[in-house]
């Protein structure tokens, strides 16, 4: 550099130095910053190379300046040294200059690294301190919460060992936290544990569920029972493996006892303390939920005899005391036997026998009721004789429903009262059916027609000569909303007694005649003749003829296709007013048949004067032909005699209740004209009758029909 022009040499150095920095720094630096850095560091190096004496400090400053501006890549140092060595320097300063620059760059880089490490260390130390501080604060908060929580908290492992509990939990159990440590969860079983609580616990510690909640009782250390609302949660590690179980228990003993008192008040009679109607039906319905096959039960429906007299004459307070005394006697006599005694209201009580062993046990309970009330009740100065009537029901659970059972027992009770009181009466299905029928008619029937609850089935009547379906009998049914489908035997008789048979009979005629007219329109002469039962009260009604005339006109049914069935009691003599109406109907073209002929004491002297064209032999005659206790040969002779009598009077004969092919064949051979019964078909819907009419032209029609 001594031989060259310093100015020229300086320009070349700055150009080379700037180019090196631009090409090899390896970091993004703004051009203006890079320009200032190149000029400042290059000037320091140029001065170090030229100044006398040599100042290595300037070269070291240039190296440090590069580090301060993030030129820390070792490749930059190598490129810088290469540029410096390429420059002509005086006094052989090249190695010294390069060494000073490299030393300054290295020292600066070391300082920078140390500063960064210290910064990182300080940050890490600060972070650690903050974490430790936060952890200590968190632990303190948790410990404060754990210790001062109003609810009991316990920690246990997955083996069921209690590891720690707080003060509140210790107090719940009547002790301190130290008394619970080491106790096993399985040791805390109580006989009244909610069903499923221990199954849920096993699932939780097995990792199959995350938590569960139950109301659970525990025994305190002093033997008392404490009720808690228990919540148990599962704690897992980062891999999901169960580690701990945390239980939280809230003491709900006071609330539970209040609920029990409220429930007792809701389910017990406030006067007598016995279970009330709601509790009784709850217990009864529970029997019907999932009964064992063949399971039975019994009911004793109890009503006091003469209670109203006591209540009205001595006052309600005396009556209440009497009811309380009666309840005490019944409870003392029957509860030890395992029977539930409840007061339904007023002076009505009921005894429920679960798992009853038969009628004898139910009757024994009824006798116990009567025996308990046999002695007078002493109230103040009054010695009150009190008796009771008891309706006894004993059934298989599968054969009835709770509501039907109570209604049956109630109806049986009233049979006991009608029989003279002070006694028990056993449930009788037939009597119950009649009572249910009377009740159903009196309560529901007036509006049943408007509600569309009645419908009509049709039973085929077959011509025995060729097996064709010659007629159908209209049979009314009642789809009762509580009692199910009722047949005419269950409500028609009572409907006659109450007069409700009139609107019902008129409706049946309208519907059946309309249906018969529809069959005629569809099938012509193949349509069957329609037979409709006429009640006695209908036959004696002055408006009968005009009603039937109107119905036939409105439906368009030919009178010749309508047959009305009357019973032997419809007309009681030749002067009976009903006879005039029957003659008027026959004059109109309607035919008449005597239904159930032979079941009454028929007056053959005036039978020939009735305008009837057919007799229907009662089904009981045919049914008796298969009774081993009766003379079958004589029975067939009676049937044959009835057929001959009818033919002598010019009447056709229909046999009812035919249930076998053999009976049908024998009736045909003795000259019986028509027959009906389950052998030919049960009562069916109109659509099934239409199907049989449509299939009547199939070859080889068999008069035996269907069973």
Image (cartoon, helix red, strand yellow):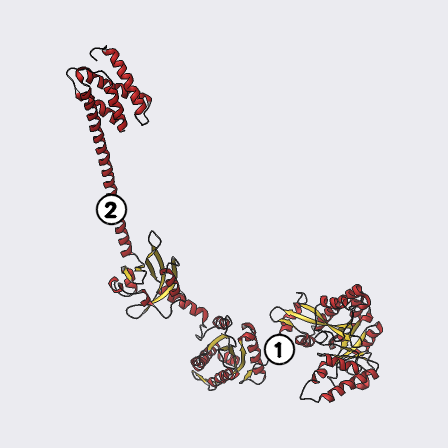
Looking at the picture, tell me which residue is in the foreground, 572 or 461.
Answer: 461
Task: Tell me if residue 554 can be seen.
Answer: no
Q: Residues within 10 Å of mark 2 (few under 14, many from 20)?
A: few
Would residue 538 appear left or right of 239 to someone viewing this image?
right
| In the image, residue 123 above or below residue 361 | above
| Quarter of the picture holding the C terminus | bottom right
Would residue 412 appear left or right of 141 to someone viewing this image?
right
Please state the horizontal and vertical placement of residue 537, each as a whole percent of the image.
73, 76
Marking on residue 132 = 2
| Quarter of the picture holding the N terminus | top left
Residue lying at the far left in this picture: please name it.
53
Q: Circle 1 sits in a helix, a strand or a loop, which is it?
A: helix
Looking at the picture, tell me which residue is in the foreground, 582 or 663.
Answer: 663
Looking at the picture, tell me which residue is in the foreground, 264 or 590.
Answer: 590
Choose the circle earlier in sequence order: 2 or 1. Answer: 2
Please state the horizontal and vertical placement of residue 513, each as a whole percent of the image.
77, 68
* Residue at 76% in and 85% down: 639
Q: Residues within 10 Å of mark 1 (few under 14, many from 20)?
A: some
Q: Quadrant of residue 56?
A: top left
Q: Which residue is mark 1?
A: 433
* Residue at 22% in and 24% down: 63
**Residue contact between numbered discs 2 and 1, judged by CB atoms under 8 Å:** no
| In the image, residue 308 above or below residue 261 | below
Q: Circle 2 sits in a helix, a strand or a loop, which is it?
A: helix
Task: Tell me if residue 22 can be seen.
Answer: yes
């Amino acid at each position: 550099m001594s031989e060259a022009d310093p100015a020229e040499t300086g320009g070349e150095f700055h150009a080379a130095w700037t180019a090196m920095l631009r090409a090899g720094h390896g970091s993004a630096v703004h051009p203006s910053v890079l320009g200032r850095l190149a000029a400042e560091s290059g000037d320091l190096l140029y001065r170090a190379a030229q100044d006398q004496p040599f100042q290595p400090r300037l070269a070291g400053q240039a190296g440090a300046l590069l580090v301060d501006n993030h030129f820390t890549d070792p490749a930059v140092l190598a490129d810088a040294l290469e540029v410096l060595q390429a420059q002509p320097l005086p006094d052989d300063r090249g190695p010294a200059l390069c060494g000073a620059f490299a030393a300054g760059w290295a020292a600066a880089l070391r300082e920078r690294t140390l500063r960064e490490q210290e910064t990182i260390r300080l940050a890490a130390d600060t972070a650690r301190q903050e974490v430790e501080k936060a952890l200590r604060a968190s632990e303190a908060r948790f410990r404060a919460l754990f210790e001062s929580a109003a609810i009991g908290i316990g920690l246990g492992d997955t083996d069921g060992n209690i590891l720690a509990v707080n003060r509140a939990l210790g107090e719940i159990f009547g002790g301190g936290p130290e008394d619970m440590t080491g106790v096993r969860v399985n040791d805390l079983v109580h006989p009244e544990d909610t069903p499923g609580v221990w199954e849920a616990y096993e699932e939780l510690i097995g990792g199959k569920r995350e938590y569960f909640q139950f109301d659970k009782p525990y025994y305190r250390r002093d033997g008392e029972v404490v009720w808690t609302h228990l919540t148990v949660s599962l704690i897992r590690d980062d891999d999901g493996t169960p580690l701990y179980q945390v239980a939280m228990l809230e003491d709900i003993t006071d609330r539970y006892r209040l609920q029990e008192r409220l429930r007792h008040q809701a389910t017990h009679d406030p006067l007598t303390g016995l279970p009330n109607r709601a509790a009784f039906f709850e217990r009864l319905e529970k029997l019907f939920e999932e009964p064992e096959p063949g399971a039975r039960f019994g009911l004793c429906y109890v009503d006091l005899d003469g209670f109203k007299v006591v209540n009205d004459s001595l006052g309600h307070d005396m009556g209440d005391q009497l009811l309380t005394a009666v309840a005490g006697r019944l409870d003392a006599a029957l509860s030890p036997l395992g029977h539930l005694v409840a007061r339904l209201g007023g002076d009505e009580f009921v005894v429920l026998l679960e798992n009853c062993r038969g009628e004898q046990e139910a009757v024994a309970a009824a006798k116990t009721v009567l025996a308990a009330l046999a002695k007078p009740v002493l109230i103040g100065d009054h010695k009150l004789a009190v008796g009771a009537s008891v309706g006894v029901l004993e059934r298989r659970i599968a054969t009835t429903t709770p509501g039907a059972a109570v209604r049956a027992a109630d109806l049986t009770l009233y049979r006991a009262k009608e029989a003279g009181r002070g006694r028990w009466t056993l449930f009788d299905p037939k009597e119950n059916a009649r009572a249910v029928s009377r009740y159903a008619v009196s309560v529901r029937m007036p509006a049943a027609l408007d509600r569309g609850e009645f419908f009509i089935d049709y039973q085929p009547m077959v011509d025995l000569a060729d097996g064709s379906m010659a007629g159908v009998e209209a049979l009314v049914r009642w789809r009762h909303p509580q009692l199910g489908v009722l047949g005419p035997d269950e409500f028609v008789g009572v409907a006659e007694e109450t007069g409700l048979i009139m609107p019902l009979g008129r409706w049946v005629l309208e519907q059946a005649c309309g249906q018969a007219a529809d069959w005629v329109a569809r099938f012509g002469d193949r349509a069957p003749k329609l037979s409709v039962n006429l009640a006695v009260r209908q036959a004696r009604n002055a408006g009968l003829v005009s009603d039937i005339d109107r119905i036939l006109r409105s439906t368009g049914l030919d009178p010749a296709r309508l047959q009305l069935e009357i019973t032997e009691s419809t007309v009681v003599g030749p002067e009976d007013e009903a006879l005039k109406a029957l003659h008027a109907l026959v004059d109109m073209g309607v035919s008449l048949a005597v239904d159930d002929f032979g079941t009454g004491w028929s007056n053959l002297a005036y039978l020939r004067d009735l305008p009837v064209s057919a007799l229907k032999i009662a089904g009981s005659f045919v049914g008796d032909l298969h009774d081993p206790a009766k003379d079958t040969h004589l029975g067939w002779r009676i049937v044959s005699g009835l057929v001959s009598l009818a033919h002598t009077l010019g009447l056709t004969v229909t046999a009812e209740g035919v249930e076998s092919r053999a009976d049908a064949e024998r009736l045909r051979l003795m000259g019986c004209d028509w027959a009906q019964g389950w052998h030919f078909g049960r009562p069916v819907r109109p659509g099934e009758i239409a199907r049989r009419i449509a299939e009547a032209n199939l070859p080889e029609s068999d008069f035996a029909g269907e069973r």
